[in-house]
Image (cartoon, coloured by chain):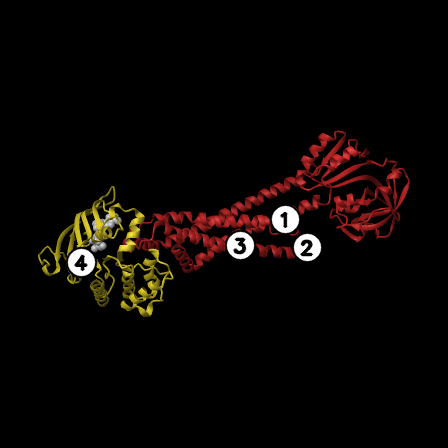
Amino acid sequence: MLSLRVALRFIAKSRFQSLLIVFGIAVGIAVQVFVGSLITSLQASLLDSTVGSSPHVILEPIEKGGAFAYTEDVRSIVRDTPAVVAISPQIVVPVLATKGEAAVPLIVRAGEFAGLDGIYKLSQRTVEGEARTGGDGIVIGKDFAEAYSVAVGDTLPLALADGTSVEARVSGIFDLGVQAVNEGTAFADSSLLAARLGLAPDEVNVVETQIDDVFSSSAVADEWRAALPQLEVGDWQERNAELLTALQSQGTSSVMIQVFVVIAVMLGIASTLAISAVQKTRQIGILKALGMSDSSTGLVFLYQAGILGFAGTLLGLGLAAGLIALFSSLAAGPDSGLFPIKLQPSFVTLSAGVGISIALLSAVIPYRNTARLDPIEVIQGG
Amino acid sequence: MGDVIVGQGLTKVYGTTHKTHALKGVDLNVQKQEFLSIIGQSGSGKSTLLNLLGLLDRPTEGSLELVGTDVGRLSKRERAAFRNEHLGFVFQFHHLLPEFSVRENLLMPGWIGGQRASLGAARARADEMLELLDLGDVKDKRSNDLSGGQKQRVAIGRSLMNSPDIVLADEPTGNLDTKNTEQVYSLFRRVHEEWGTTFVIVTHDRSIAEQTDRIVEVRDGRIEQDVRNEHLATSGSRPRTP
Ligand SMILES: Nc1ncnc2c1ncn2[C@@H]1O[C@H](COP(=O)(O)OP(=O)(O)OP(=O)(O)O)[C@@H](O)[C@H]1O
Ligand SMILES: [Mg+2]
């Protein structure tokens, strides 16, 4: 207890040094938590915009552009895979949408609305009208609507490859955040087109699925490849190798930044604490002459480091939370172009542990020197 | 009355390659309640001897018994505890803790000994001591804000707080003027008379030594003279005090 009392006095006496250490730790922790949360959120945001509203694993016929029978056998394999959270069998039809003079190529993805919505989150991403297919209803992209001045309620004639045409009515306009999709994709119910294409009731062009953990897509794809040799199985990770590499190197650089921050902070604290311990040599010698044990005097510096580490960590977490709140309020503004950043609890625990361990580690040298100090050196030296 | 210090053949050699024989077999017995001074020229080994007696250093050879304990057998930790419990120190430099108030400096030996900080009895004793030392007005000041004489009186108070068997003082008035020096010695005398504490005081100053009951003169690491004050030798071998 006396060690703690002495530690508190030493801290109070060298206020400036103590503040320096606390701020050093705080800045280190804040950078760590902020950068960690930033990168994690950035990755989550990138990942979400890439695969959040798109399929993860797809089934297609071996022959490109063909159709295949989505039989009960295939259905059950897909349905019984536990990771699968959304399934959407679709007929995919390239059409020419005519608007005034213009004939614009458009890919219509036709299927049950629930399935489409499961993959593309249409009901959350509708900016005008209603996300509803059924009958002649069609949902088109924002960029397409703007480019050709198509509004909700308009009829849109769609010319098929065989020269015939279908009348569709625009029921909603979506924004999936990807220009190519917003321009060139439309969603409809399969009843709108299936009959015209002469497909059997269970025939589809593609089955799109989403799974709960996006990174397990390869495992799921491998499983299906083995079970369904008659089909081509696609996996988003294969199609986005570059993005994955980028995410990975981002993760690595984030770890590197954090490691260097930790090293810098540790060196700073260790040297400041060592200096402070040297400055207190006389006091330690006196305490020892009066009968304080080696371990109790050593404890003074462990307590000092622990207290400063704790204070610095708390301050650092506060700083990080403030920074993140500031960033989030900027990101929340309209058209900020920023992604939302969330304080990652894992980084908070990690950094709190790191902060206090750094401080305690920095106290090892002062602890040893203090325990070793012979009071006679101080008493004789005057 | 029993001996509180029994030193036999106390030898101290400093250094390993370049050896300094600071003490060359000193026998010294001190009885309970003695008031004794150690004199000798600079470099004669006075501080070395006192540091051995104070368990701040270990003899290279020889044995030492303090208040009936063979202190040579004690571990480092036990020696520290023994210092705290049985010995009081006053050095030439006051060696107070600047982070603590005057009163806290007095309470420190008790705290180190495991006394609880809030203990009212300890505070009362400290306050009593401060009155005795004429420091009542400055007890809440930081030790750095005191005069030299005041600081040394605080150090004396601190040395007495744990009711030690022996007070060891190394040139306690080396940095003080005549008036403060006199005050310190009359304090020592008073404590000696009232509480029967044993005092061993190292000094350069023969006029101070002459006020003590027994004078031990050290010369070149050996005891040259050991006399009761009233029979103090006045031979030519008497060292010149610098
Ligand atoms: N730590 C040490 N290392 C090496 N030699 C030492 C050490 N301490 C003292 N000595 C030597 O031991 C001898 C005795 O020193 P000591 O300090 O005991 O003398 P002293 O009588 O107290 O002198 P003074 O009156 O100047 O204080 C001296 O020669 C000194 O140089
Ligand atoms: Mg000396």
Q: Which mark is residue A41?
A: 1
Closer to the observer: label 4 or label 2? Answer: 4
The residue that mark 4 highlights is B36
Q: Chain of mark 2?
A: A
User: Which chain can be seen in red?
Assistant: A
Q: Amino acid at mark 3?
A: Gly
Q: Position of residue A311 (x, y in %)?
A: 49, 55
Q: Quadrant of ligand 2?
A: bottom left
Q: Which of marks 2 and 1 precedes in the sequence?
A: 1
User: Which chain can be seen in yellow?
Assistant: B
The residue that mark 3 highlights is A316
Left or right: residue A263 versus residue A366 is right
Q: Amino acid at mark 4?
A: Leu
Q: CA distance from mark 4 to mark 2?
A: 86 Å
The residue that mark 2 highlights is A336
Q: Check chain identity for marks 4 and 1: say if they share one.
A: no
Q: Chain of mark 1?
A: A
Task: Count all numbered tags in the image, as a single digit.
Answer: 4
